[in-house]
Image: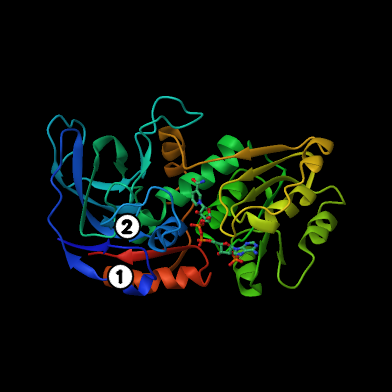
Amino acid sequence: MKAIVLHAAGEPDTLRLEEVPDPVPSAGQVVVRLHAAALNHRDLFICRGQYAGLRFPVVLGSDGAGEVAAVGPGVAGVRRGDAVVINPSLDWGDDPRTEGSGFRILGLPDNGTFAEMVAVPAANVAPCPSGLSADEAAALPLAGMTAYRAVVTRGGVRPGETVLVTGIGGGVATFALLIARQAGARVLVTSGSDAKLERARTLGADQGFNYRTQDWVKAVKAATGGAGADLVIDGTGGKPFDQTLDAVRPAGRVVTYGATLGPAPELAVRRVFWKQLDVLGTKMGSPDDFRNMLALFGPGCLRPVIDQTFPLAEAGRALLHMAGAAQFGKITLRVA
Ligand SMILES: NC(=O)c1ccc[n+]([C@@H]2O[C@H](COP(=O)([O-])OP(=O)(O)OC[C@H]3O[C@@H](n4cnc5c(N)ncnc54)[C@H](OP(=O)(O)O)[C@@H]3O)[C@@H](O)[C@H]2O)c1
């Protein structure tokens, strides 16, 4: 089969499609013939050597959708030809609150989805939500599940609350907007692009603020009668994470799922205790998070936001598009 194989850390434009052996399903596994895959910021971090536990060579990619091509020994309930979407949380374990010691994310260390085929545990495939294209289905798993856990499981969003989502152009962020709206929340967003703020409004964001040209903390306060948001969903890290502690109301919740900009330089502990904040970390998702997220998507329900689709062979160009924060929503790869 053909796959995008990372042999050493470097810039994405060095990535090429190459011939590798077809995966063979071990006991309990299935092989999925991929129709589409999707990018996550993790793939960019791995490509550039900025991720823990690197190993080479590795096939990149956590997200994919396609059909079951082969079934390993001992697999029940999944058949050749089934249309499936892959849950990239491998071996989460039994505790819905946190992952077990065997937990891995598909696409490092296990070979991932930027390929014509991938082997995954049979427990990690689910029927594709009907009515979605292969690209839409492939866009769902990692970012949709992360957003679901951030907004619902960890964030505990309630109808009528005001939720602030930072960096709305991001893959996880667009899902957080959709899921918070679906839960009956009012959603405020930030972005470095006015065009992305406009797109977010068409998806139901109530107001948006440009972090390059506006004092967005002041704007969030003004939009909430001086109080601040009830719940903040942040994957930016860096200074914007510090600022979320000002943008949230007293006794509010801040959920952090990422640090695209690196560590928060002056995490103000005083604001956490003085405002009696709940600061909540979240990672990927449990099997329940995945199932509950999938149930929100399909005909008459939510649809993921696709920014652009590239051919599999152009995965490097797709990653550079992400590196420039040019996207609004998910970037997908057409495999077949
Ligand atoms: N905890 C987990 O399990 C988990 C799961 C998924 C992702 N993550 C992490 O979450 C982060 C986002 O992942 P992703 O795949 O959604 O990435 P992505 O699609 O590349 O989105 C990144 C977004 O960050 C925003 N951004 C950049 N500079 C910013 C700033 N100064 N202030 C506010 N926003 C800024 C941009 O939004 P605008 O263009 O709108 O400005 C950009 O689109 C990554 O760090 C990733 O590793 C963690």
Question: Disc number at residue 108?
Answer: none
Whole-percent x and y of residue 226? 87, 51
Residue at position x 34%, y 34% from top?
A: 91
Residue at position x 58%, y 53% from top?
A: 259
Callout 1 touching callout 2 (CB < 8 Å): yes
Question: Disc number at residue 15?
Answer: 1
Of 265 and 237, the residue lying toward us: 265
> What residue sits right under mark 2 in the picture?
60
Q: Does the closest atom of ligand 1 sit within 8 Å of the Cβ of label 2? A: no
Residue kind at label 2, given as amino acid type: Leu
Which of the image's four quarters has the N terminus? Answer: bottom left
Residue at position x 48%, y 69% from top?
A: 323
Of 177 and 264, the residue lying toward us: 264
Residue kind at label 1, given as amino acid type: Leu
Question: Left or right: 225 with respect to 334?
Answer: right
Q: Quadrant of ligand 1?
A: bottom right
Question: Left or right: 118 with respect to 161?
Answer: left
Residue 188 shows up from this direction: no
Whole-percent x and y of residue 202? 61, 65
